[in-house]
Image (cartoon, coloured by chain):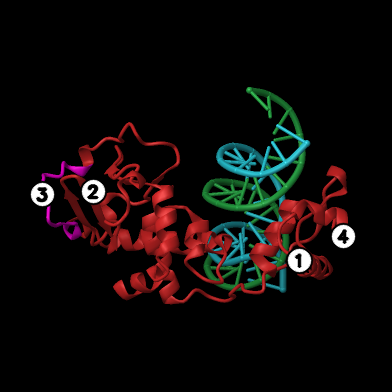
Chain colours: A red, B cyan, C green
Amino acid sequence: MVKTPCTSSMEGRKKGAWTAEEDQILKDHVRNHGEGKWNTISRKTDLKRSGKSCRLRWLNYLRPDIKRGNFSEDEEDLIIRLHKLLGNRWCLIAGRLPGRTDNEIKNYWNTTLRKKLAEEENYSKQSKENIILINSTETIPSCSKETKPATTTNNDLQIDASWDSVENVNYKQQIGSTSVFLQGIDFTDYEEDKFLTVASSSDQTPLFSDKLLGSWLADQDNLSFELVQDS
DNA sequence: AAAGTACGCAACCGCCGTATA
DNA sequence: TTATACGGCGGTTGCGTACTT
């Protein structure tokens, strides 16, 4: 699909679809100078593109390791599971799918998966029984009554799934430390200070910090494999 | 065959965090 | 400490294509 190129009046910057010539200029520049310093590209080459536009074009289209074509069932399943865990953190999700870009995953989610999941949700509303509480050493209050803790910040990750819609959740709470098994993922070994919050918010969603999930994901190279195996 | 509508996706926009002067 | 530039991210737009009427 090719968009008609158009020219912005702002500083002669070009906008719209990229041409093959522009792609070649950008590829040559990155090959010779590496990624980064995107704003210098328009000064050092004939490209009349903003640095942002160059960066986006490279990351989403020109990068050599980009995987093209339809998403496989495994990839689709992984996206769904990661989205339950991470919400709209497309860059984090893309980090677990080699060759896929955040933009591609975001588009796929918005155009295909969201609809598909909505249809499935309408079809079956039985997940409530799938919440399994194990090894509780104290009573876990009703999730629906929990409120967002005072320690929470705007950087907290709010998992984009209500307790009612999360499947196969094992929630374990221990005296002295907090352990959470979510979607088969064990957070037990993580230092307690990394658990900014382990609770549910007023809208019935559990909260985790970006720091926790970012470091955890970085450590768990086999996450994709495990999640796929899980399905 | 033509017009209208829905869909997919590349690209843009605005915001935010970080680095630097 | 403040201002500015830049990079990164998620949300949104708009164009081309496919499908429907």
Mark on residue A137? 3
Q: CA distance from mark 2 to mark 1?
A: 46 Å
Picture coordinates of residue C18 (x, y %)?
60, 73
Q: Quadrant of the N terminus of chain A?
A: bottom right
Mark on residue A30? 1
Which residue was labeled with disc 4? A45
**Residue A69 in view here:** yes
Name the side, left or right, on which A15 lies relative to C2: right
Which residue was labeled with disc 2? A178
Q: Are marks 2 and 3 on the same chain?
A: yes
Relative to B18, does residue A77 appear above or below in the rendering?
below
Helix, strand or loop at label 2? It is strand
Name the side, left or right, on which A63 lies relative to A50: left
Residue contact between numbered discs 2 and 3, judged by CB atoms under 8 Å: no
Name the side, left or right, on which A94 lies relative to A32: left
Q: Residue at x 45, y 72 (%)?
A: A75
Q: CA distance from mark 1 to mark 4?
A: 11 Å
Q: CA distance from mark 4 to mark 2?
A: 55 Å
Badge 1 crowding class, 10 Å Cα cut-off, few under 14, some 14 to 19, many 20 or more, is some
Picture coordinates of residue A27 (x, y %)?
77, 69
Q: Specify the subunit that label 3 lies on.
A: A
- Principal secondary structure, stretch drawn in magenta: loop
Asked which quadrant contains residue C17, the reply is bottom right
Q: Specify the subunit that label 2 lies on.
A: A
Q: Are marks 4 and 2 on the same chain?
A: yes
Q: Residue at x 18, y 49 (%)?
A: A173
For the record, the magenta segment spans A129-143
Q: Are marks 2 and 1 on the same chain?
A: yes
Q: Specify the subunit that label 4 lies on.
A: A
The disc labelled 4 sits on which kind of residue?
Thr
Helix, strand or loop at label 1? It is helix
